Image (cartoon, rainbow, N blue to C red):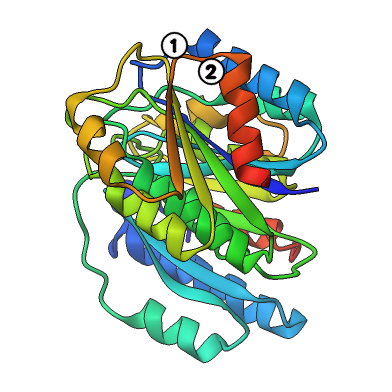
Amino acid sequence: MNKSFQELIPSKLDVAKEALAAAVSRLARKGAYIGLVFFAGRAFPVLNLTNNYNIFYTILSRRIRTFEASAPGDAIIEASKLFWGTRCKERKIIMITDGDYNEGVPPEAAVLYPINNKYNIYLIILNIKGHDKIGELLNKYNNIKIYYTKSRNEVLSAILSIIGET
Amino acid sequence: MAVLGIGIDSSRSMPRNWIFNVVTDLLDMAGDNEYIVGAFSSTAYIASGPESNPEKILRIIELIPFSPGTPDPYPLVRELVEFAALERLPLRGILLLWSMPKKPRSPCYYASSLALSSMVKLAVLTPRPYPPRWAYSYTRECDNNIVFYYRKSKEKLREIINFFLE
């Protein structure tokens, strides 16, 4: 089944949740630590880095309220902060977004700290309408990899590729 | 070696060449310290650090983009204090390069109180030739945890370094 997002019921949010759940079930085997930040016009860190995957699934399964506006820079900052004070050797930030940016810290500013500290940043852009400001702003950085996806299967294969499961 | 914070007002009212000159002089005078660089407007973020390489620090400062909103130092002071606490860094002082708008978004009292309770000194250096009205009353009331300087000079920078390291 490789329907485009326009045809998808449920929504982009559900596609993102489904891909995250698949990724985390594989990361659990490796004992990876996982945190979670939701964002719209603000960013909300909801889970500090943990290897308690049940909490992750519980949060993911709850109904998420959606808001207008998009502050991806704030989300990158909050995701970076989850690593403060930890000794994680490999630091990956995966952002699933529709590519819009109209609020908060400029994304090119938000990536300065993680890039300088050798974090890897992955953007999965659910490119439904073809507008992706964040991709345009961040495609110049070497350690930011951008995946443009048009279907549920492409999101899944992108996230599995990021965690080294393909 | 001490750890010091540099907080850069990233609003359009701050002349970038002025910021660059101040930081260049600071690093010439006190290059044997480590620096955490952050930026603030209505939001705040850490851009790099701790870093002791002057070239890297200056390159980061060049990359900080302009951000909208009235510059408010409190969120950045909070970020720096939290970062230092979590990463166990002995942060001694924060130099705020701030346009000091006529109507501050939050009173400087909040930033200096947080710094005071965290045993961190604050210095404000501004390109303004004279203080805004609010700063006169503030300067009279404040404790010995914060100093204000108007216009840059090497002597003022030397005083700030001594204030942090005394």
Q: How crowded is the residue under tag 2: few (<14 C-alpha within 10 Å), some, or many (20+)?
A: many
Q: Nearer the viewer, residue A73 or A60?
A: A73
Chain of the residue under the numbered disc 2 shown in the image: B
Q: Residue at x 51, y 40 (%)?
A: A110
Residue type at mark 2: give it.
Answer: Ile
Q: Residue at x 66, y 62 (%)?
A: A160
Q: In the image, A25: left or right of A90?
A: left
Instruction: Tell me if label 2 and label 1 are in contact, CB under 8 Å.
Output: yes
Q: Position of residue B73 (x, y in %)?
A: 37, 41
Q: Position of residue A5 (x, y in %)?
A: 36, 50
Q: Nearer the viewer, residue A156 or B94?
A: B94
Residue type at mark 1: give it.
Answer: Pro
Vertical side of A114 occupied by A27: above or below:
below
Q: Quarter of the image holding residue B100?
A: top left
Vertical side of B147 occupied by A23: above or below:
below
Chain of the residue under the numbered disc 1 shown in the image: B
Q: How crowded is the residue under tag 1: few (<14 C-alpha within 10 Å), some, or many (20+)?
A: few
The circle drawn on residue B19 is 2
Give the spatial CA distance, label 2 vs label 1: 7 Å
Q: Residue at x 40, y 77 (%)?
A: A60
Both marks 2 and 1 on one chain: yes
Residue at label 1? B15
Q: Position of residue A46 (x, y in %)?
A: 40, 72
Q: In the image, B123: left or right of B35?
A: left
Mark 1 lies on a secondary structure that is loop
Q: Nearer the viewer, residue A104 or B127?
A: B127
